[in-house]
């Protein structure tokens, strides 16, 4: 699976659900209370974080995506703290305030990074469903995805009306479900239960196949498009209509705290889908994000730089200079995930701006870009004495360092036709003043239904011209 960092800045998301305040009292513990066998914590730091649907919206905003949040709070200090923190993070809040109910608050007493006790302040809200629906309708034309963040606290009492309103506007609906009645999410685009929530509804799954079978049956029953089951240390399983089940391994290197991991999954998934990422890629990104967040304490938002670094690590294990046999294995894996292979070739003796722009455009023609490079002997035969300027190893190293290039391979023949027969790319790309018919290897690619495209180099950029200018200056 080829993961890239989406354009989150153009991916607005609406979150509707149970808003909470996660409050932390931190302090050292040096003695046991004389009143009872409990530790005494000297509180020296108070920390407030948005929780529940607030954490989902915060994660979306932290990725750089515009976020709107509709929920229910009390009319109190906790609600003010929530709104201030969310507004400061760039989240637009539309809260229904209840004067006779407290804002849901989870107070955790912490010492030396360990939770000693949690105190919950909450009463179920008597939510005005019509007012929530009106708020949502007023925002649907501004967003590309809607999330129902359901903690069963009373903010969501009209799931079907909200789903119907979003569907009327062609806005996909993702739901993080709660309880044993999943029928309230009927018609949603995708739901994201964890394994225990899933098995509470469909029954215990003794095998992978049973999980897949029961999951697909649930998709049909609830008229969903997809189902994502989060499975803790077993990773995630994505089931979707007409697609092969996708099992992703857990990414965490060290598990510190699983609080908020579900929020991270659905927020990253929603933002990626709003950025027009394919579903499988969006799930892959959410899996990476979950692996980051469970290495942190408490509810925590994943920043765009953190996710970008994780994506880059992922890319690093799948890119670079390969031999022909290694390349075939990599291509087989890529095709198993539905990725289109793009191929281009050349000497690439001196990498210049024309090459960089050309390779970026070539990469846009598919999911993976292979650059085949003439070895030194073939360059010498094609270009004459004094060429290549740079050895094949150096040329390949530079190409492999470009963000647009996935794999680099060398070939000894004067043409790449033998390599094309072996690789059978989906798209053959060549740069220069050619017609499609003049591209070497075009008949091979066209014979099995592949595409051949000719792209233009950046004007006034030419390796030959650069070499001539260097020689002229040297002669002078």
Image (cartoon, rainbow, N blue to C red):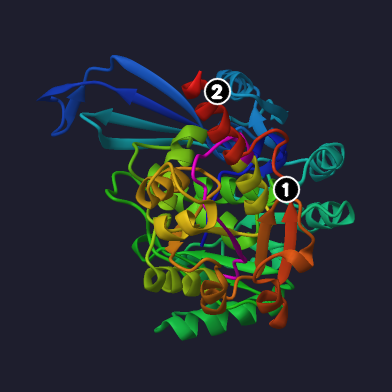
Location of residue 84 (image quadrant): top right
Let me know if residue 58 appears in the view. Answer: no
Disc ID at residue 146: 1
318 lies left or right of 68? left
Q: Is mark 2 on a helix, strand or loop?
A: helix
Residue named by callout 2: 78
- Residue drawn where x is 49% and y is 55% of the image: 406
Q: Is residue 401 above or below residue 240?
A: above
Q: Taking 274 as reference, is 41 left or right? A: left
The residue sitting at the right extreme is 168
- Residue drawn at x 15%, y 26% is 35
Among numbered discs 1 and 2, the one appearing first in the sequence: 2
Q: Is residue 353 magenta?
A: yes
Residue range of the region highlighted in magenta in the rendering: 337-354
- Return the mark for residue 228: none
Q: How far apart are marks 1 and 2 (CA)?
A: 25 Å
Please name whichever residue, 334 or 103, is drawn nearer the observer in this view of the structure.
Answer: 334
x then y, percent, for residue 448: 69, 82
Label 1, secondary structure: give it: strand
Nearer the observer: mark 1 or 2; the answer is 1
Extreme front residue here? 475
Image location (x, y in percent) of residue 221: 70, 78
Left or right of 160? Residue 318 is left
Q: Nearer the viewer, residue 79 or 223?
A: 223
In front: 2, or 8?
2
């Amino acid at each position: 699976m080829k993961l890239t960092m989406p354009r989150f800045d153009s991916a607005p998301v609406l979150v509707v659900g149970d808003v909470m305040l996660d409050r932390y009292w931190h302090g050292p513990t040096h003695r046991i209370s004389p009143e009872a066998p409990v530790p005494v914590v000297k509180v020296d730091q108070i920390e407030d974080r948005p929780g529940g649907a607030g954490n989902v919206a915060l994660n979306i905003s932290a990725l750089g995506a515009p976020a709107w949040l509709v929920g229910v709070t009390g009319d109190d200090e906790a609600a003010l703290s929530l709104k201030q923190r969310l507004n400061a993070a760039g989240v637009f809040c539309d809260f229904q305030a209840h004067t006779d109910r407290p804002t849901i608050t989870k107070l955790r007493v912490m010492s030396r990074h360990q939770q000693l006790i949690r105190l919950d302040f909450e009463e179920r809200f008597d939510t005005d469903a019509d007012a929530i629906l009106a708020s949502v309708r007023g925002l649907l034309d501004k967003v590309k995805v809607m999330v129902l963040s359901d903690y069963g606290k009373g903010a969501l009492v009209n799931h079907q009306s909200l789903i119907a309103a979003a569907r009327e506007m062609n806005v996909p609906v993702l739901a993080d479900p709660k309880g044993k009645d999943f029928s309230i999410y009927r018609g949603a685009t995708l739901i994201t239960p964890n394994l225990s929530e899933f098995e509470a509804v469909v029954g215990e799954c003794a095998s992978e196949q049973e999980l897949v079978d029961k999951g697909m049956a649930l998709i049909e029953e609830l008229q969903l498009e997809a189902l994502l089951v989060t499975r803790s240390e077993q990773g995630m399983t994505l089931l979707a209509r007409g697609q092969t089940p996708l099992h992703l391994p857990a990414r965490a290197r060290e598990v510190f705290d699983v609080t908020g991991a579900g929020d991270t999954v659905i927020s990253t998934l929603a933002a990626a889908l709003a950025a027009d990422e394919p579903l499988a890629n969006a799930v892959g990104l959410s899996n990476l994000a979950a692996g980051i967040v469970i290495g942190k304490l408490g509810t925590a938002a994943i920043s765009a730089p953190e996710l970008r670094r994780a994506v880059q690590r992922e890319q690093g294990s799948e890119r670079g200079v390969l031999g022909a046999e290694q390349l075939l294995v990599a291509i087989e894996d890529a095709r198993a995930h539905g990725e289109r292979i793009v191929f281009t070739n050349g000497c690439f003796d001196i990498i210049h701006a024309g090459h960089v722009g050309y390779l970026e455009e070539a990469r846009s023609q598919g999911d993976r870009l292979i650059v085949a490079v003439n070895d030194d002997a073939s360059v010498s035969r094609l270009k004459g004495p004094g060429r290549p300027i740079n050895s094949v190893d150096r040329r390949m190293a530079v190409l492999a360092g470009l963000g647009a290039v996935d794999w680099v391979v060398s070939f000894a023949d004067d043409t790449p036709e033998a390599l094309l027969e072996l690789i059978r790319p989906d798209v053959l790309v060549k740069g220069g003043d050619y017609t499609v018919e003049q591209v070497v290897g075009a008949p091979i690619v066209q014979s099995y239904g592949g595409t051949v495209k000719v792209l233009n180099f950046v004007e006034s950029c030419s390796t030959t011209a650069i070499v001539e200018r260097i020689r002229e200056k040297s002669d002078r």
